[in-house]
Image: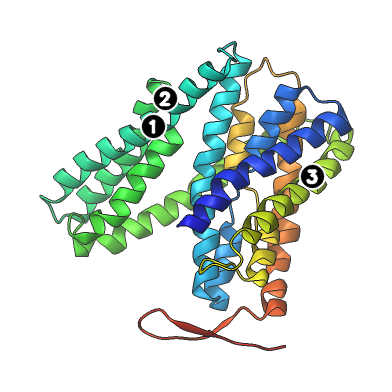
């Protein structure tokens, strides 16, 4: 968990700052437009990487690092995006104003998510009908998001908190054993459907855009995003050298190249206020970065995993492993 938090929170800040500075200095974007793009593109969405991990039986710790980092940095990016949108809309830009907005958005979102999850777990413990329990998790997910957003808090953090509590506490008895496989299957499909809808929406939008006009900015953005990922992963992991939390250098290579961008970046891009001067360019550029990460980084990931010798050769019942060294 400490490693995940380090990569998810300071990591998002470093990656977003690198991209924002680069887009402002190299392309002349306004600071607010460059910062919004930096934040929304900083969150990773390694769905295809995780699928490759399962198929190739990757070493367990690496899979946990990639998945847990993605889970937390989504929340970090969403909070940063909300604060920047508030600033762009005329909210107070004093340090005190930004700090109070941050506390309200983060603490409020977490509190709402925890409260909704508590109610769900209380009700779910009274039934063993898997259809009712799936319905309750759906209400918790969307209800926590909508309530938090209604009060100007982070809906993403609210839903994330609710999901973490249901997935950990709920599995200890509140969600019946009969319903667990059904709940997991339902949310696996829901995640697939949501990702597909976002990509369809962005694709429909891009069909009417002059993509050639943004080819140069897209190429610059891809380089800056990769650079930001490098600056976020290697220095932060270096801080852990000499401790029990040290991250293998091969894992760091996978974290850098496997930091794909996906549906959250596209959804946030579409949610940009019309008042942002670079809105059209941000949407097109975000789509280009996501396309590069999915088709180039995602498709080359299995080769890199084998090259790094990270396929687990044996995992015993307690979860320990030995790595297959093929080089």
Q: How is the image coloured?
A: rainbow
Asked whether residue 43 appears in the rendered view, the answer is no
Circles 1 and 2: CB atoms closer than 8 Å: yes
Residue name at image x 40 percent, y 78 percent: 319
Q: Nearer the viewer, mark 3 or mark 2?
A: 2
| Residue 315 appears left or right of 327 | left
Tag 3: Cα neighbours inside 10 Å, few (<14), some, or many (≥20)?
A: many
* Helix, strand or loop for disc 3: helix
Q: For the N terminus, which image quadrant?
A: bottom left
Crowd rating for badge 2 (residues with CA inside 10 Å; few <14, some 14–19, many 20+): some
Q: Which residue is mark 3?
A: 224
Q: Position of residue 116 (x, y in %)?
A: 26, 37
Q: Please name whichever residue, 171 or 229, is drawn nearer the observer in this view of the structure.
A: 229
Mark 2: which secondary structure? helix
Q: Residue at x 58, y 36 (%)?
A: 267
* Distance Cα–Cα, label 1 vs label 2: 6 Å
Q: Position of residue 110 (x, y in %)?
A: 36, 36
Task: Indicate the position of residue 79 as horizontal and vertical percent values.
Answer: 52, 33
Q: Which residue is mark 1?
A: 107
Near-viewer residue (204 or 152): 152
Q: Is residue 220 above or below residue 308?
A: above
**Helix or strand or loop: what does disc 1 sit on?**
helix
* Res. 150 in view: yes
Outermost front residue: 242
* Relative side of 158 to 170, left or right: right
Q: Give the percent coordinates (x, y) of residue 70.
A: 54, 52
Mark 3 or mark 1: whose residue is earlier in sequence:
1
In the image: residue 288, left or right of residue 254: right
Which label belongs to residue 104?
A: 2
Q: How many marks can you see?
A: 3
Q: Earlier in the sequence, mark 3 or mark 2?
A: 2
């Amino acid at each position: 968990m400490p490693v995940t938090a380090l990569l998810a929170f300071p990591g998002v800040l470093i990656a977003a700052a690198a991209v924002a500075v680069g887009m402002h200095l190299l392309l002349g974007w306004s600071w607010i437009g460059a910062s919004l793009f930096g934040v929304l593109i900083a969150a990773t969405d390694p769905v295809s990487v995780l699928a490759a991990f399962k198929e190739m039986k990757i070493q367990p710790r690496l899979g946990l690092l990639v998945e847990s980092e993605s889970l937390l940095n989504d929340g970090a990016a969403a909070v940063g995006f909300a604060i920047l949108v508030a600033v762009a809309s005329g909210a107070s830009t004093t340090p005190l104003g930004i700090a109070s907005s941050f506390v309200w958005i983060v603490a409020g979102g977490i509190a709402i998510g925890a409260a909704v999850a508590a109610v769900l777990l209380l009700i779910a413990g009274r039934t063993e009908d898997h259809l009712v329990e799936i319905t309750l998790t759906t209400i918790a997910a969307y209800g926590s998001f909508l309530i938090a957003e209604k009060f100007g808090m982070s809906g993403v953090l609210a839903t994330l908190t609710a999901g973490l509590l249901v997935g950990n506490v709920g599995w200890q008895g509140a969600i019946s054993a009969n319903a667990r496989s059904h709940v997991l299957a339902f949310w696996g499909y829901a995640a697939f459907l949501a990702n597909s809808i976002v990509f369809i929406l962005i694709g429909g939008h891009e069909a009417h855009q002059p993509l050639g006009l943004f080819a140069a900015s897209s190429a610059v953005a891809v380089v800056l995003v990769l650079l930001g990922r490098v600056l976020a992963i290697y220095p932060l992991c270096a801080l852990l050298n000499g401790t029990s939390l040290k991250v293998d250098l091969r894992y760091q290579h996978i974290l850098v190249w496997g930091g794909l961008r996906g549906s959250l970046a596209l959804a946030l891009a579409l949610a940009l206020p019309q008042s942002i001067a670079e809105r059209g360019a941000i949407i097109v550029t975000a789509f280009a970065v996501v396309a590069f990460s999915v088709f180039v980084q995602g498709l080359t990931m299995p080769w890199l995993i084998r090259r790094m010798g990270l396929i687990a050769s044996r995992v015993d019942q307690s979860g320990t492993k030995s790595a297959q060294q093929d080089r």
